[in-house]
Amino acid sequence: MQDAMPASSVVSTAYSRVTELIHRDIVEGRLQPDSRLKVVDLARQYGVSPSPIREALQQLQAEGLVVLLPNRGAVVRGIDAREFMHMMHVRAAVEGMQARICAAVADGKLLTVIIHAAGRFAEAVEAGDRDGWFEWNRRFHNAINGADGGAIALEVVERANGVMAAFRRRWAPGLERRRLAVREHDAIVSAIRARDGESAEQAARVHVLNSLHDIVERVRSEGAWQGPLPLDLRTARVKKKSSRATGGRTVKTK
């Protein structure tokens, strides 16, 4: 007769599972920014006791997705436009660096993964598959960001993306921007295949910063961002060095 699983192992398993589920629901927008996260309600929703819920909320606070407030409990972390812009600038710098490294170290197997992800992203864009292009875009960038085997850059980008997820989904790119992203992905792939680290870095930075500009313009057009931009967009400019690296496009400035 098999021994029963220790209670501590059961709690640990429930904690891991419920942490992943709450993380997913925040990132995918089912749990909205600034909404309260009541332990009793979450325990009922996910079918666990309150103990793993409390542990999960502590972990999600460490990841920047949840805020624990005195006398209010937990809330989904909100993000304003200023913080979003800052995170996108950080992401551009990190992803540019990682694309340069990827161009130097990528082997045939990794190139196959990157090219496959880029192709599936393009297919999802044309099919209008919102979940698909979010997922394959994530896989494309993760493959490049993790090319050197280190975890730090990947963790920085993943954490920033988790915090920004609801914001990005609220102002998800239109078809024109998504098609431009396909060409930008192709430019990054071309530079990596050519072992051209400088062009790979520039193409990756332009890609992220063009996404930033697109979102900023749509946020402002809907009146959700009043007044002057909190950061001068001229600081985001990346000069064009080759049409191959940038897809023939430079980041627009105001």
Image: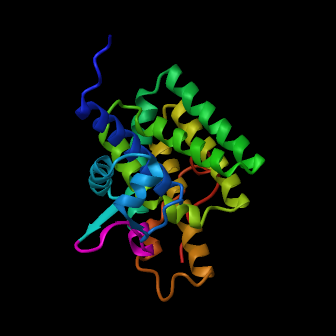
Q: Quadrant of residue 86?
A: bottom left
Q: Quadrant of the N terminus?
A: top left
In this view, which residue lies farthest toward the bottom? Answer: 227
Residue drawn at (48%, 65%) of the image = 237
Q: Quadrant of the C terminus?
A: bottom right
Q: Is residue 92 visible?
A: no
Visual colour scheme: rainbow
- Left or right, 90 with reference to 253: left
Percent of width and height locating residue 107: 47, 22
Write the start and end of the magenta stretch as one range: 70-85
Percent of width and height locating residue 199: 50, 44
Percent of width and height locating residue 158: 40, 48
Number of on-image labels: 0
Residue 120, relative to residue 201: is it above or below?
above
Residue drawn at (44%, 46%) of the image = 47
Q: Nearer the viewer, residue 125 or 233?
A: 125
In this view, which residue lies farthest toward the right? Answer: 127
Residue 49, relative to residue 163: is it above or below?
above
In this view, which residue lies farthest toward the front? Answer: 1
Q: Is residue 172 magenta?
A: no
Residue drawn at (41%, 27%) of the image = 105
Q: Is residue 80 magenta?
A: yes
Q: Is residue 239 visible?
A: yes
Residue drawn at (40%, 35%) of the image = 146
Q: Nearer the viewer, residue 153 or 252?
A: 153
Percent of width and height locating residue 236: 45, 66
